[in-house]
Amino acid sequence: MTTVIQEKTPFVGIRFQKLGKLYHFKVGAQHDVAMGDYVLVETKRGRQLGQIMTFVAPEQAHKQKGMRAIERKATPRDLVMKQLWESKELDALITCREKAAELNYSDAKFVKAEYSFDGSWLTIHYTTENKKLEIKPLQNAMSKAFRARIEMRLIGPRDVAKIMGGYGACGGPRCCSTFLTEFSPVSIRMAKEQGISLSPQEITGMCGRLRCCLVYEYEQYVEAKKTLPKLGKRIGTPRGEGKVRDVRVLRDSVVVDIEGEWHEFFRHELEPLDELEALQKKAEAGCSKHEGGGCDCGAKNGGTAVADDEGGDETIVE
């Protein structure tokens, strides 16, 4: 992940879409660029217009090989041209779907058409579960219909949900369509650590994959559970001894069953009875390291240990 910094450096992070990834470029001869400026750069998909979102620290930027430099700042004409081609993207998508229907592409879904800023490149985003789908005939048909270089780009379910937008199971706008620029790996273990039901309806998003929000509080749960008592553990409280029935990680507290009544206690109010009893038993048992004598830890002689001082004489340590 790129760290956002305000100070100017020889490298910048540029975004080509509203919630797209950051790509690193050299400032080159354009020393007067600033955050928020729109610039033209050469990419694998031809010339693109993007916005500078941050200056990148050199130690991060050098990790990318073949880094290109900014060509120039975008002019008002460039921005107007970009808006013009964006207004034609819906028509291009409709045409693509019509061509796909004619060619019987029933197992593919075409979700977005995207022009480059000058209309020289048209990218069609599609999704399918058919790994053997031959997309070349549709690409050729689109090339005949448009005076642009056509790219057919396969995307996953998460990207489809990001493009389509809408609302998530929580009732709010989908995270991927609102602020997420990259998708983090999500595992079933994250749901288990947070005590979330493993029912598919509870942990899967509208894309059919594990919800992105399972990542948000996972680290806090893991760290808190290292110090909070586990379910069923015997614990001491200001109201007496009881068993833990619920762990409320975000409140830093537990719910304890004391003689049939449940009470909530915070971390500083708890005493780990099992650990304290184990320490007490160990102290009463004395030293077990030195069988047949020779103890120097003080456990066998009532807390008095014998040690040698620097001069070689025996010293009694209380």
Image (cartoon, rainbow, N blue to C red):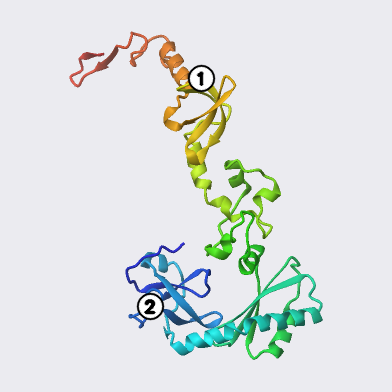
Q: Residue at x 56, y 83 (%)?
A: 116
Amino acid identity at mark 1: Glu
Residue at mark 2 = 27
Residue 275 numbered tag = none
Q: Residues within 10 Å of mark 1 (few under 14, many from 20)?
A: some
Would residue 215 be found to the left or right of residue 151 on screen? Answer: left
**In which image quadrant can residue 247 be found?**
top right
The kind of secondary structure element at disc 1 is strand
The residue at 54%/22% (across/down) is 242
- Position in image of residue 122 (x %, y %): 62, 83
Where 211 falls versus 272 (above or below)?
Answer: below
| Disc 1 to disc 2, C-alpha distance | 66 Å
Instruction: Tell me the element at label 2.
Output: loop
Residue furthest left in the image: 311
Image height of 227 relative to 71, above or below: above
- Residue 241 falls left or right of residue 164: left
Q: Amino acid at mark 2?
A: Val
| Residue topped by disc 1 | 241
